[in-house]
Amino acid sequence: MQIRQPIVAVLGHVDSGKTSLLDRIRGTGVQGREAGGITQHIGASFLPTETIKETCGPLYKKLEQSENKVPGILVIDTPGHEVFTNLRSRGGSAADIAVLVVDVNRGFQPQTNESLKILQSRKVPFVVALNKCDQISGWRKSETSFISQAIKEQDASIQADLDQKIYDVVGTLSVLGYQSEAFYRVKDFKSEIAIVPISARSGVGIPELLSVLVGLTQQYLQKRLSQEEKDPRGIVLEVKDEVGLGQTANIILIDGSIKKEDSIVVAKRDGVIVTKPKALLLPKALDEMRDPRDKFKPTPQVDAAAGLKIASPELEGVLPGSTLYVARNDDEVTKYTNLIESEMKSMFVDTETNGIILKCDTIGSLEAIVEMLRRSQVPVAKADIGPVNRRDVIEAKAIKEKDRHLGIVLAFNVKVLPDAKEESEISHIKIFEDKVIYSLIDNYNAWVEEDTAHQEDAIFSELTPVSKFTFLKGMVFRNNNPAVFGIRIDVGTLKHKIPFMNSDGRRIGNIHQLQHDKKTVTSAKTGDEVACSVQDVTIGRQIFEEEVFYTFPPSHEAKQLLNKFMHKLSTEEQEVLNEIVEIQRKKEAAYAY
Ligand code: GDP
């Protein structure tokens, strides 16, 4: 069975050492003497088996026994989640495996989390490279390039410190739902994520990192990497106008091979194009380059996995992140055209249903965000690429009338056009803007939660409050017209202008006014002693000194309080509400006889 090399991507927080790690991995090849060294591709570097073997030394022995040996690894040159999101493939990822770089002294940082969420949504296996080990205070420099050996050479306190830092990562990953371990303690590489301490600066740990990567791919990714029955296809990473070449697209070829005479089928925003490449290009080696402008050399065929440049005037307007298929006859052209069309349809959401409006900068970010929104059960009415325009806001406005939490726009890494901004201000349509996927979604969710709570507060504050109060002995200020007397609030909050009843459930009337220290107040709470006035009752007839009263919410309000707002009441208020309901129930039962 023919197995291709895995495509490896490097992700992590800014300054964690991603570029240094890539340089170090590529340098490994450059320094490899007799071995073939690395081959520079477009946007990627290829490390052949020979180079890996030389770097890994005795570690490679075990890898060599595998029945599914990979011919090397293809490392994507640009690190970070921005490129990674465009390395998409039918809802999954074009990268087969990833290295998540974490700074040993800083642990998880915002973009580490962002990277992890994207790896999770694309279901990409990964290894954690715990970088900058040489910066652990007290770390002793050693000659070896093997981290296992370097650790043995450290003082016990430094070993303990490293262990602690590894366990911090294990703890963080466990909160996020992953099991992980230092690679030398991993028992099952399928269920545990391996953490490899390294130093991109000194190169220590690179042999172990490479052997874990190769070991994992050989053991678990054979099916993905097998070239049997695979459609030849790639992914567009960048489209640009190159001096002397015209329109070009940088492609990562994922499966199969591409020849110069093949047709390529690729998506534009509004349709599919079929074109024959003017040239397939690879970078020239430094010693072949006579003129710095003359960077590329034409080639008749490229085999996956590889990074190449395709020149063709028709590539203008092709979106980064688009899938590209290689067709050898008309039937294949039709087949791939249909495939791309259905893929585009499922990706660019445009429905009549209620949902949020999403605008993104690239296909990759769009797909990742739609997936994450689906996971958090947020419906999407429209998802597209480009700046937020007035029409987006108007559509959100129509949706808001049906669902106030869905009538919004999420803008990821795109501009909001001035007329859209103006319309959003006039129509009070919220536009959430962000450059970090998870904070875009988190901020939206937080707003929904806050707004729901506000709405609840507003409804709750309109309801008759729950309260129990006592007519104080000797506190009669006026017998009637209106009756004015002193009360003590036993439980809850009493407000003016609300109905109340006695302990038999008979409605007495409304609290007309409340006075505290001779000043009119609108409410009084537990423990307060206040004067209240009530119209149309006479003390000694309908009400009596030392009598206990309750507020009297109408039955639909009592139901709302019971079903929706119990969490807003104190334990004592909950008890009083139950008493009120019980009194009413008894009274109604008595009427029934
Ligand atoms: P990126 O933003 O993730 O690509 O990080 P860089 O590779 O640019 O590294 C950021 C800084 O950390 C640079 O100054 C590097 O020299 C430094 N750095 C990277 N790896 C290591 C390491 O293993 N040890 C030490 N001491 N410094 C490192």
Image: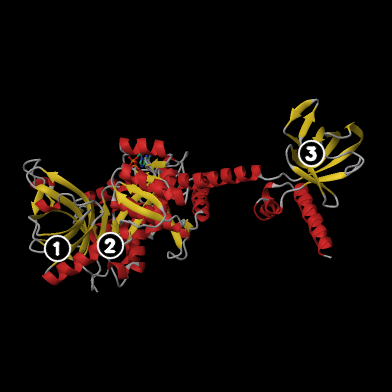
Please name whichever residue, 591 or 70, is drawn nearer the observer in this view of the structure. 591
In this rendering, the label closer to the viewer, 1 or 3: 3
Left/right of residue 541 with respect to residue 339 in the rendered view: right
Q: Residue at x 64, y 45 (%)?
A: 460
- C-alpha gap between disc 2 and disc 1: 22 Å
Q: Which residue is mark 2?
A: 343
From the image, tell me which residue sits under label 3. 526
**Left or right: 455, with 196 as reference point:** right
Identity of the amino acid at label 1? Ile
Q: Which mark is nearer the camera, 2 or 1?
A: 2
Q: Amino acid at mark 3?
A: Thr
Q: Quadrant of residue 409?
A: top left
Residue under label 1: 258
Neighbour class for label 1 at 10 Å: few (<14), some, many (≥20)?
Answer: many
Foreground pick, 151 / 282: 282
Give the mark count. 3
Estimate the x, y position of residue 279 in percent, counting from the top left.
8, 55
| Type of amino acid under label 2 | Glu
Rendered-image quadrant of the N terminus: bottom left
Residue 203 circle label: none
Task: For residue 96, say whether it is visible.
Answer: no
